[in-house]
């Protein structure tokens, strides 16, 4: 079983994606209410080598020598990957040793105000920072940030990164009714989006149990109306606001907005891992999953749900996992020690 790698998962956005987790559970600069990894246990802005560079490289070498090459190697997992001070070195290693594999970084973006973080991510092919709120009240409610994070500097950090980054930048916004879906929230987010100017905006919503109970996912109708508003050419207000902040003339060019499909259908699945029990544990260690999620993520044939259920039963009997009933089905998650 790998300690720092997980999957590969059949990712909604990246195809076959091998995950790399550069921090231990659950170290983050935010404590988002919707976090599928649970509550943040170490809320910090301190950058250090939370997991050792050499060990990560050893696991990558072992994986790539023994498995098919994934489409992407993706930095995500159970915390904020840019908190690891060696993330730039790991990206450098991958791009110099296996340039055919694309590198993606899923980050909350709060550290992009730091020049070292921005420079460390320059060689990634895809960076997906998130921004869920551009008003202080909503930011605090939904993201529950470390108290040294200044919202304006956070947004400016993403703007500064966009200015120097040549790869694809996708800005992810997770919409959570009652937390960040008011008219004012969406107007302010639109303003921030056009300042950042990503290649694409990705709208997402809750898909799994969050860090707190009773959260409601956004409906498809709500996501579509927000998408239409974000893409619409309107409001001189945005132009004026952006011009006054950047001191440059602003010409409106609509940014494409994608709604992230809610779940994968498992039609093109390929089985990528033989050691299924370890792969299941590595996956649900990072996010709760249903049997169908695991079948999709791990590339099992549809008719292998029974096989996955058997593994889950064994893991439950061994006291390693537990299950929780949710609207979308029974989610399996790691047993908290
Ligand atoms: S969702 Fe991401 S940014 Fe938010 S607490 Fe979880 S790991 Fe951190």
Image: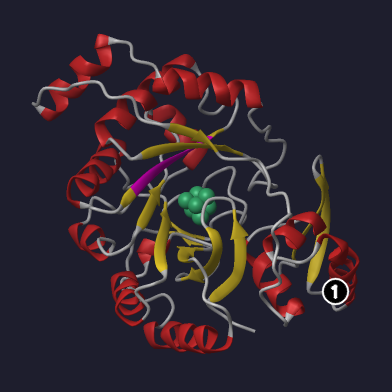
For the point 40% across and 65% down, the residue is: 102
Q: Main secondary structure of the magenta part?
A: strand
Q: Disc 1 marks which residue?
A: 311
Q: Is residue 171 magenta?
A: yes
As drawn, 257 above or below 303:
above
Residue furthest to the front in view is 268
Residue 327 percent location from the top left of the image: 81, 39
For the point 65% across and 72% down, the residue is: 282
Compared across the picture, whether 18 is left or right of 295 comes to left
Image quadrant where one finds the C terminus: bottom right
**First to last magenta residue range:** 169-174
Q: Nearer the viewer, residue 86 or 96?
A: 96
Compared across the picture, whether 178 is left or right of 164 comes to right
Compared across the picture, whether 50 is left or right of 12 comes to left
Q: Nearer the viewer, residue 202 or 41?
A: 202
Q: Is residue 325 magenta?
A: no
For the point 85% across and 66% down, the residue is: 304
Residue 166 percent location from the top left of the image: 23, 53
**Residue 158 is drawn in which quadrant?**
top left
As drawn, 9 above or below 180:
below
Total numbered labels:
1
Image quadrant where one finds the N terminus: bottom right
As drawn, 7 above or below 62:
above
10 Å crowding of disc 1: few (<14), some (14-19), many (20+): some
For the point 57% across and 78% down, the residue is: 68
**Residue 176 is drawn in which quadrant?**
top right
Badge 1 marks a residue whose secondary structure is: helix
Residue 237 percent location from the top left of the image: 26, 12
Residue 54 percent location from the top left of the image: 39, 88
């Amino acid at each position: 079983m790998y300690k720092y790698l997980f999957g590969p998962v059949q990712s909604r956005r990246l195809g076959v994606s091998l995950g790399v987790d550069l921090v231990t559970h659950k170290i983050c600069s935010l404590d988002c209410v919707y976090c599928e990894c649970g509550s943040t246990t170490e809320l910090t802005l301190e950058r250090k080598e939370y997991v050792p560079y050499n060990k990560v490289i050893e696991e990558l070498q072992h994986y790539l020598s023994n498995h098919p090459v994934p489409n992407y190697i993706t930095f995500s997992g159970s915390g904020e990957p840019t908190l690891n001070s060696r993330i730039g070195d790991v990206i450098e290693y991958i791009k110099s040793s296996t340039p055919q594999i694309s590198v993606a970084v899923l980050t909350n973006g709060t550290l992009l105000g730091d020049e070292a973080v921005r420079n460390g991510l320059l060689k990634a092919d895809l960076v997906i920072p998130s921004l869920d709120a551009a008003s202080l009240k909503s930011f605090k409610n939904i993201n529950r940030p470390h108290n040294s994070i200044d919202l304006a500097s956070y947004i400016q950090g993403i703007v500064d990164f966009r200015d120097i980054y040549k790869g694809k930048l996708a800005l992810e916004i997770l919409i959570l009714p009652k937390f960040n879906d008011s008219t004012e929230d969406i107007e302010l987010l639109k303003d921030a989006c056009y300042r950042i100017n990503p290649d694409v905006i990705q709208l997402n919503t809750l898909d799994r149990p969050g860090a707190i109970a009773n959260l409601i996912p956004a409906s498809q109708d709500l996501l579509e109306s927000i998408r239409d508003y974000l893409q619409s050419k309107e409001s001189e207000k945005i132009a004026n606001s952006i011009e006054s902040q950047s001191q440059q003339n602003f010409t409106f060019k609509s940014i494409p907005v994608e709604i992230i499909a809610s779940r994968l259908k498992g039609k093109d699945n390929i089985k990528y891992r033989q050691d299924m029990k370890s792969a299941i544990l590595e996956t649900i260690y990072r996010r709760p999953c249903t049997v169908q999620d695991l079948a999709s993520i791990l590339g099992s044939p549809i008719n292998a749900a029974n096989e996955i259920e058997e593994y889950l039963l064994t893991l439950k009997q061994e006291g390693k996992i537990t299950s929780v009933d949710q609207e979308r089905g029974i989610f399996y998650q790691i047993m908290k020690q």
